[in-house]
Image (cartoon, helix red, strand yellow):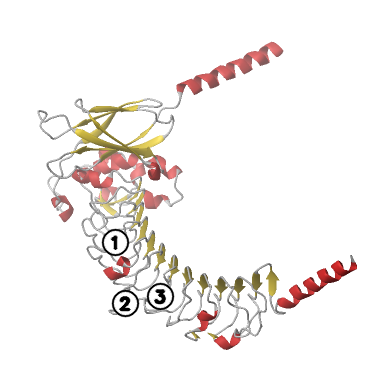
Amino acid sequence: MESLLLSFLGIMVGMTHACPEVCRCSGKTLDCSLRELTDCPVVVEDDFQIWNFSGNEIPSLTSRSVINSVTNVANVLDISNNKITIAEENFFLNFKNLGELRISNNNVNNFGFILPPALEILIASNNSIQRWPDINLLQLQHLKKVYFDHNFLKSVSCSSDTNLIFNRLEKLDLSSNKIDHIDICVLQSMPILHELDISFNKLETLTDGLFNSNAQLERLDFSDNLLRSIPKGIFEKLPNLAILLLSGNRLVTFPVQLPILEVLDLSFNQISNIREHNKENVYPHEFLFLGGNPFHCDCGVQWLKEFLDTREYQLHYLNIPEEKFIPVCQSPSDLMNESWNYLSSDLFVCDFQNPRKETEFDDLEIQKKLELEVVDIGDTSVKLRWNSFRDMTVAESTYQLKYHQFGHKDKQTTHTFRSPSLSYILQNLTAGTAYVICLRELVTYSENLEFDCVEIIMKEDNVLFAYMIFACILSMLFYVFKV
């Protein structure tokens, strides 16, 4: 028993000795943060997996400071919030199994480091980096997430002598830089990219084909740039795109040929009108933000006013400022600064003696497509009806119907069917639930037609309601007879 106790005390002493005096240690974590260190003056003798040296005064990184330490087990190195300006080119190779490097909030301006090939997460936010370090990232085939936000990058381009392919990169954050150009080759090297954030930069245009190699993209953020237009069809090859953020740019027209999105944010641009024949570009998106645009409130946008009125209930699902969601009139003068949620659509009239000047958006070709409407809504079924521009003598048409619960596009259901009566009853829906339903006609002599969509809220379950009433009556009778 005595020998066991001595052995235990020996282990405890060894563990205490393994933790450098100026640091705190817990399990496999070495915490030397907030110690006003100007160097790494400690010898780390234990196999710590997390090294935290954040919040100190370290100005540079040299291999000398860690040469006698056990570094090959470290998986996370946090040296953020220091005063680092330079580092030895091979310093990080001392941590050969490093999976995550946090070097944000320093003074690094030249990211010329050779990084360990096992690295998966690189966080270099809030520095002074001016050049996209593609050559330095060449060997990092395990990279999954890269953060270079809040730096001074001016362009993102490829070196002529490199052919990088990041087969695992899922997220790239380049927000809050000074980027005015992105080479196509950069995004071509990231085939499974899911999320791209280039907000708060200086992009004026997007190059055609920029996203042709990024079919896995789910979230794109171009907010607060200088974009004046979006190339037609630039997002067509992004079937998984769910969130497209274009707020705070200089767009004057509504983008066309978009995939059906969960969130489309066009707030605080320069859009003054959206004509009704462009409804197919507007309607399918579940959350559409148009607030902060200088709308001319005449009969041309009356349909849009009525459409957005039906969506005011969405504010209950959102945690955003109301002014981002609800437009305000910029003109005519009698409606200036009036919020749409306080105006009747009857006030959106046209002065035909002073017709509005047409814009390029009105010149877009009006595509022929069916128009879907709801005939009857039950608690678990809905009857749909539509018209068709095709000659009714043409053989019975084939239709494709897609529907999903509001806010759950990822659980979308698709039906393909024939209907000579131009109607369909969709069944097995959930009572009291909101749905988005889209329909298009499948044709063989040309491209398939565009979807037309409607939003509905199913009726509450009458059986459940009756049961609740019956239960209330029974409770009252029980109370009466008990008294």
Q: Do the residues labelled 2 and 1 touch (CB within 8 Å)?
A: no
- Reading the image, the residue beneath label 1 is 213
Q: Is mark 1 on a helix, strand or loop?
A: loop
Q: In this view, does 34 lie to the left or right of 217?
A: right
- Reading the image, the residue beneath label 3 is 137
Count up the numbered dots.
3
Q: Position of residue 228 (x, y in %)?
A: 24, 63
Residue sitting at 28 percent across and 72 percent down?
A: 181
Q: Position of residue 125 (x, y in %)?
A: 46, 72
Q: Judge the density around disc 3: few (<14), some (14-19), many (≥20) Cα neighbours within 10 Å.
A: some
Q: Are marks 2 and 3 in contact (CB under 8 Å)?
A: no
Residue sitting at 15 percent across and 51 percent down?
A: 364
| Mark 2 residue type | Thr
Q: Label 2, label 3: how many angstroms apart (C-alpha)? A: 11 Å
Q: Label 2, label 1: how many angstroms apart (C-alpha)? A: 18 Å
Residue sitting at 78 percent across and 71 percent down?
A: 11
Numbered circle sitting on residue 162:
2
| Mark 3 residue type | Leu
Q: Is mark 3 on a helix, strand or loop?
A: loop
| Mark 1 residue type | Ser
Within the image, what quadrant is residue 8 found in? bottom right
Residue sitting at 20 percent across and 38 percent down?
A: 442
Residue that protrudes farthest toward the top in the picture = 481
